[in-house]
């Protein structure tokens, strides 16, 4: 039975890399006040945010948790380095820097509480600061990808944030 991903289109890449069959259920973040706030979606994720992954009889609703679960249950190709605890910690550091230092600033639930006149200025300031800090980390960790020469969880976190920042 395939998994099912409920999101805004950003999380299918992890499933594709892991070669996992899945059904996509688009969740429009603006339509009808945000489909992620519907009663139907909140049955999957009471917090009302995307993504939500239904797989193996379980529902997970956090990007990093989803990637780590898939990496534990479907180890190839690895998205967290194997056999090198320091490199694994670096991947988690970069991923958390993105997830907590850049992504929340792009969150529509956060932005709706700012007045329209300050929203763009505030967002640009904090997103630029987050990317500047991330750049300093990547100067030490990157190779072909964020941490070394193999794609990792950090890369899967970074690409959507770069796209959304534009």
Image (cartoon, rainbow, N blue to C red):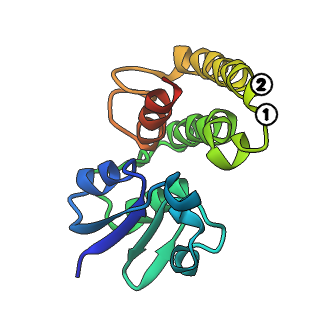
- In the figure, is residue 90 to the left or right of 144? right
Q: Nearer the viewer, residue 81 or 146?
A: 146
Q: Are marks 1 and 2 in contact (CB under 8 Å)?
A: yes
Tag 1, which secondary structure? loop
Q: Residue 6 falls in which quadrant of the image?
A: bottom left
- In the figure, is residue 4 to the left or right of 130? left
Question: Which mark, by number, is residue 115?
Answer: 1
Compute the Cα span from label 1 to label 2.
Answer: 6 Å
Figure label count: 2
Q: Residue furthest bottom?
A: 57
Residue 151: % across, % down: 34, 37
Question: Which mark, by number, is residue 118?
Answer: 2
In the rendered image, the vertical position of residue 42 relative to residue 134, given as above or below: below
Residue 91: % across, % down: 52, 38
Question: Which mark, by number, is residue 76?
Answer: none
- In the figure, is residue 144 to the left or right of 40? left
Q: Within 10 Å of the Cα at label 1, are there few (<14), some (14-19), or many (20+) other Cα atoms?
A: few
Q: Nearer the viewer, residue 28 or 59?
A: 28
Tag 2, which secondary structure? helix
């Amino acid at each position: 039975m395939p998994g099912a991903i409920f999101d805004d289109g950003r999380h299918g890449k992890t499933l594709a890399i892991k070669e996992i069959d899945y059904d996509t259920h688009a969740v429009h973040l603006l339509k009808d006040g945000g489909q992620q706030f519907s009663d139907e979606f909140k049955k999957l994720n009471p917090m009302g945010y995307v993504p939500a992954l239904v797989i193996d009889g379980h529902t997970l609703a956090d990007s990093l948790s989803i990637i780590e679960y898939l990496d534990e249950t479907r180890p190839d190709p690895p998205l967290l380095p194997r056999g090198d605890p320091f490199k694994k910690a670096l991947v988690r550091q970069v991923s958390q820097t993105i997830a907590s230092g850049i992504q929340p600033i792009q969150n529509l639930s956060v932005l709706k509480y700012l007045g329209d006149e300050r929203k763009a200025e505030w967002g640009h300031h904090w997103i630029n600061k987050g990317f500047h800090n991330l750049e300093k980390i990547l100067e030490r960790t990157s190779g072909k990808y964020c941490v070394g020469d193999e794609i990792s969880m950090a890369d899967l976190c970074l690409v959507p944030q770069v796209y959304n920042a534009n």
